[in-house]
Amino acid sequence: MNITALKTFLAIVDTGSLVRASQVLHVTQSTVTARLKSLEDELGQQLLNRQKSGTTLTPAGTRLLSYARIMTGLWQQAKYETGLPAGLASVCTFGCDRELWHGPGWAFFSGVIAQNPDIAVSVRQGGARDLDMWLSEGAVDVIMTFESVTRGAQTVHALPPETLLLCSDRPDTPMDADPLYTFVDHGEDYRRQHAEDYHDAGVARISFDSSWWALQCILDRGGSAYLPETMVRPYLEDGRLYPVAHAPIYQRKKNLIANDASVQNWAWFQTLIDDLRGGA
């Protein structure tokens, strides 16, 4: 089966049309059509319904979809590992929630690099849905995420929770009446707890779904926000930010989830997890 044809099929599914797939793949629409036809001919099944409004999966296409993602992910892994330069024995592919890179994600990456000079490291950032999909497809070996759902032969390694502190650029900021307060969306559990504790606060004028962007905002424009302690610790230490007195402190669970087959020969993996649990 042609990997290029599978990638083309996935591009059509992800973009919703042959035209947009051709733009993403930087090929002509006729090339996309030919690749799809060759795949359908090989399988003896129509994979997509084609309409003016776009494409939809047929039952056969739906069945192929997860296999196509797995096969293209494994092929990408195989190409990467086969092409490693001399002196590198294997590769660790690491998927990290973008909210966890500043602190625990960087600590994992740095630990792999420092402890294993013969291992190459490939890092991908994404949200919870992306990370779950990549791990299931075999496109990554291990992910750092706020989720704890596993699929098949995967193991969850719980890490110390992420502590969220209310920080401000002013030392005397009130806990619940700061007109410059910026809301950061740290997930469903956080939204519920925050709503209970600040039920009279009203709606913040500025909100982000990124801690890093919120941090840059209050450093540049002033204000306060709930931010991960690992991220703001340097700014608290040098006096650019201040913890808001008497403000509630929240915690958000975080985990490493690994494909068991990928890490079974990594003697260093458990040691690194222990380091993360002790230093986080």
Image: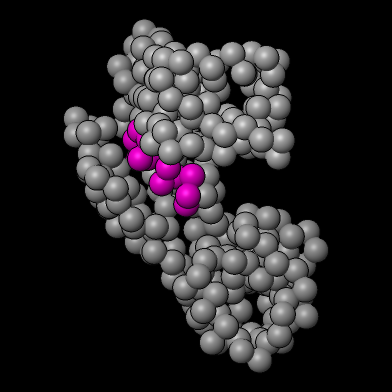
**148 up-or-down from 185: above or below:** above
**83 up-or-down from 238: above or below:** above
Q: Is residue 232 left or right of residue 45?
A: right
- Which color mode does the image show? one colour
Residue at screen point 26% across, 32% down: 262
Q: Main secondary structure of the magenta part?
A: helix
**195 up-or-down from 275: above or below:** below
Quadrant containing the N terminus is: top left
Q: Position of residue 244 (x, y in %)?
A: 61, 79
Front residue of 26 and 105: 26
Quadrant containing the C terminus is: bottom left
Front residue of 189 and 273: 189
Q: Quadrant of residue 61?
A: top left
How many numbered marks have been drawn onto this rendered protein structure?
Answer: 0
Q: Position of residue 185 (x, y in %)?
A: 59, 66
Q: Is residue 16 left or right of residue 153?
A: right
Residue at screen point 47% across, 20% down: 40
Q: Position of residue 256 (x, y in %)?
A: 34, 49
Q: Is residue 278 magenta?
A: no
Give the residues in magenta: 128-142
- Identity of the residue furthest to the top in this view: 86
Q: Position of residue 57 (x, y in %)?
A: 51, 38
- Residue 129 in sight: yes
Residue at screen point 52% across, 41% down: 125
- Residue 111 in sight: no
Q: Quadrant of residue 211?
A: bottom right
Q: Is residue 230 left or right of residue 166?
A: left
Front residue of 178 and 134: 134
